């Protein structure tokens, strides 16, 4: 088999650039290092070509360029995924950073979003009309990666996962074709893209249903002393499963460094935190949230009505670009004494003070979607455990990653409920991880993969093997 040399790739890439509305960035170009850098500072990779697309046609040409030369293909939306799959050594990166357009149809309550947009771009546009799409909790997160993995955010219990509001996509397939997928056309592809990750093509635009929430929500952050963590989690479990859908909440075990920017009441302290957003009538929300505020004497109670956009920025100081991140997850059915002991014990020996264990409240609209309606089968789970190992010193990589992996395994052993693919570590469990994520829906996903990407071009993700390959690994 012939091998394409670096010089040949460079010459061909410069020819490709002439046919694009966007541009090509190559090693040695002044913009190269900035273009290959990702939010997670652990990731340091050197792709062969970065195609900074501006149109779906640019994306099509980039995919054809790569596949015709048997070059690996990775896709960059927001560049915010912890695993860093957006950039791969020696690959052609299809970079959507300049495709960030957002168009709101307020009358129809829909919004069309280009594949490189961040959720903050959409929030800014929809909130002008008192609308919102149920996205994530950090505005720099890419719409594409969040959506293709399912999408969890502040509005999850009222409106479901992000994919539950997805109406249509435009995508470029591995064959270099531009297709529109929805419930009527390419419906199998549309089903797979609602949680099946980046396995099936490059999504160049999404059309979402937007929901009316107004511009303000009730926000509550109640910080408790860490020595009350066991009792706090037990109380949270007994209380939270009876709450209305307008409440989406977390119980978080973590801490803050001794930083002058942190509130004085919690600076340099470990804590248990009840974090909530109520998107309905604020007076009713005050009554619903009151038990969380009155459970015990808090270190700090930060509760009040705030603009939704402001709430979306609450986590901004906690996740700076260039920090070091490794996140895992597991769905669980409940917080029994054994699970609480696991979480509290591991929280107490975090190597980094800014790492957290997040207990995401589920249920509500998330649970009312049948398990087979989208690729995500864990619709009935009560909680998602998010294990967020966050630190800043490269010398501490090994111990922080080891802490997260050890806790993940302990949680899985106690409650083997599957994982959320957007919090999947570095994907090191490969096929086992993917099958745990998709459960009974995996076989259908593998068939769709075989139809749209039989050569597994789009494999830098929580990878689903095409059906024939998947079947050969299981005998």
Image: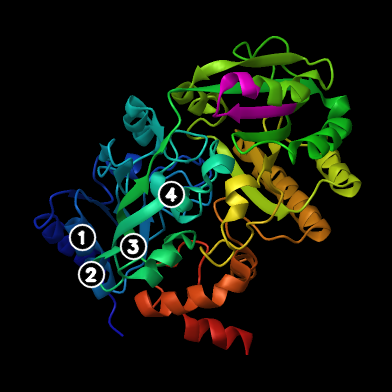
| Tags 2 and 4 touching, CB below 8 Å | no
Q: Which mark is on residue 177?
A: 2
- Tell me the CA gap for discs 1 and 3: 38 Å
* Mark 1 vs 4, N-terminal side: 1
x then y, percent, for residue 333 = 76, 53
Mark 2 or 4: the one toward you: 4
- Tell me the CA gap for discs 4 and 3: 12 Å
The residue carrying mark 4 is 165
Q: Which residues are magenta?
A: 273-285
* Mark 4 vs 3, N-terminal side: 4
| Tags 1 and 4 touching, CB below 8 Å | no
x then y, percent, for residue 396 = 67, 39
For residue 104, which quarter of the picture?
top left
| Tags 2 and 1 touching, CB below 8 Å | no
The residue carrying mark 3 is 182
Residue at x 19% of width, y 52% of height: 55
The residue carrying mark 1 is 10
- Tell me the CA gap for discs 1 and 4: 41 Å
Identify the element where label 1 is drawn. Answer: helix
Q: Between 401 and 211, which is closer to the camera in this rendering?
A: 211
User: Is 468 placed left or right of 107 in the picture?
Assistant: right
């Amino acid at each position: 088999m012939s091998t394409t040399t670096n010089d040949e790739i460079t010459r061909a890439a410069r020819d490709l650039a002439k046919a694009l509305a966007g541009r090509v960035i190559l090693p040695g170009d002044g913009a190269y290092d900035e273009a290959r850098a990702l939010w997670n500072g652990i990731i340091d990779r050197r792709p062969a070509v970065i195609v900074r697309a501006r149109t779906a046609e640019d994306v099509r040409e980039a995919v054809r360029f790569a596949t015709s030369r048997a070059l690996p293909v990775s896709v960059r939306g927001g560049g915010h995924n912890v695993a860093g799959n957006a950039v791969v050594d020696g690959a052609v990166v299809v970079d959507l950073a300049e495709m960030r357009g957002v168009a709101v149809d307020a009358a129809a309550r829909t919004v069309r979003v280009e594949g490189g947009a961040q959720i903050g771009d959409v929030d800014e546009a929809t909130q002008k009309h008192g609308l919102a799409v149920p996205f994530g909790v950090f505005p720099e997160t890419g719409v594409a990666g969040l959506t293709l993995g399912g999408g969890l955010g502040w509005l999850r219990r009222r409106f479901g996962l992000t994919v539950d509001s997805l109406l249509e996509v435009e995508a470029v397939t591995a064959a270099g074709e531009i297709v529109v997928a929805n419930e009527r056309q390419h419906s199998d592809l549309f089903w797979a893209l609602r949680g099946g990750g980046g396995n099936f093509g490059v999504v160049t635009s999404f059309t979402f249903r937007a929901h009316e929430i107004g511009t303000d929500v009730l926000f509550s952050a109640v910080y408790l002393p860490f020595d009350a963590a066991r009792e706090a989690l037990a109380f949270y479990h007994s209380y939270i499963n009876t709450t209305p859908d307008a409440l989406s909440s977390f119980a978080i075990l973590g801490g803050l460094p001794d930083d002058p920017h942190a509130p004085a009441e919690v600076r340099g302290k470990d804590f248990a935190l009840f974090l909530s957003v109520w998107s309905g009538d604020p007076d009713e929300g005050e009554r619903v949230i009151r038990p969380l505020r009155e459970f015990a004497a808090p270190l700090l109670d930060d509760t009040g009505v705030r603009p939704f956009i402001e709430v979306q920025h609450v986590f901004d100081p906690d996740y700076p670009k260039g920090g070091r991140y490794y996140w895992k997850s597991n769905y669980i059915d409940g917080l029994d004494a054994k699970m609480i002991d696991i979480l509290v014990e591991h929280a107490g020996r975090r190597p980094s003070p800014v790492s957290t264990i997040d207990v995401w409240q589920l249920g509500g609209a998330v649970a009312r979607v049948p398990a087979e309606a989208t690729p995500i089968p864990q619709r009935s789970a009560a909680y998602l455990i998010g294990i967020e190992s966050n630190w800043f010193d490269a010398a501490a990589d090994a111990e922080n990653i080891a802490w997260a992996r050890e806790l993940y395994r302990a949680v899985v052993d106690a409650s083997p409920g599957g994982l959320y693919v957007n919090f999947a570590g570095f994907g090191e469990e490969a096929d086992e991880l993917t099958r745990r994520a998709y459960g009974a829906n995996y076989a259908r996903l593998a068939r769709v993969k075989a139809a749209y990407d039989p050569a597994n071009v789009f494999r830098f993700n929580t990878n689903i093997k095409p059906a024939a390959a998947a079947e050969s690994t299981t005998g």
